[in-house]
Amino acid sequence: MQIRERLIIYPLLAIVALAAFLDLRFIQAESKPGKASFNKLTIVDETGRPAMVLGVFDGKPVLRIYDQSGHTRAALGLVSGGAALGLFDQGERLRSTLSIIRGNPYLRLYDEKRRQRASLALVKGDPKLDISDENGKARIGLGLVQGKPELNIYDQNEQPVWSALAEQ
């Protein structure tokens, strides 16, 4: 590089670096709580496709993670009464959720038609497992009630047809 080019390029680089520094200080000053000026942040991969999106949807923060085809594969966010993580298949169908609702943890599994087929929960400290039919209706319930084993069998309308509670 010739001296004349250096005399032009180096001052320009210094100006760009100073502008970037001042802009960074401005962004830091503006990103205090209540001062953020965006409601969605998209992180892209090396090809420019969205890999993650952090945003506010329906008034609640949500993080969505995408695969290389651009399909949603995971979502983490706040829901009514708690927080949830949703995992999706290649067709963007919800297949499982892990959530905390009103202090109770839940794991739910869904079929390819998005119908809940199994649920595992701790409700007020007692574990509960529900198995559902192809219509998403609970048909078998197994759990502990105040420390005592309980088994319930339900009809297609989720009405109990048989129940057993072990006496201890």
Image: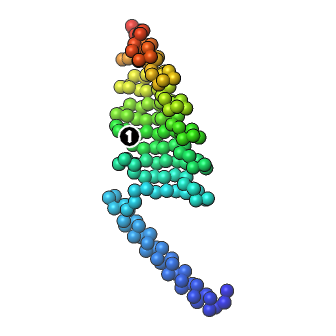
Between 11 and 140, which is closer to the camera in this rendering? 140
Quadrant location of the N terminus in the rendered image: bottom right
Quarter holding residue 81? top left
Question: Can you give x and y, in whole percent of width and height, for residue 110 in the image?
Answer: 51, 30
Question: Can you give x and y, in whole percent of width and height, for residue 19 in the image?
Answer: 46, 77
Q: Residue at x 41, y 26 (%)?
A: 122
SS for callout 1: strand
Any part of residue 118 in sight: no
Between 139 and 4, which is closer to the camera in this rendering? 139
Q: Residue at x 39, y 7 (%)?
A: 167
Looking at the picture, the colour scheme in use is: rainbow
Q: Which residue is mark 1?
A: 79
- Picture mark count: 1
Any part of residue 5 in sight: yes
Tell me the crowding category of disc 1: few under 14, some 14 to 19, or many 20 or more residues within 10 angstroms, Cα based. some
Question: Can you give x and y, in whole percent of width and height, for residue 82 in the image?
Answer: 37, 38
Q: Amino acid at mark 1?
A: Val
| Image height of 133 relative to 29, above or below | above
Residue at the farthest right position:
1
Question: Can you give x and y, in whole percent of width and height, for residue 144 in the image?
Answer: 41, 17
Residue at the farthest bottom position:
4
| Image height of 13 relative to 80, above or below | below
Q: Residue at x 58, y 47 (%)?
A: 67
Left or right: 2, with 154 as reference point? right
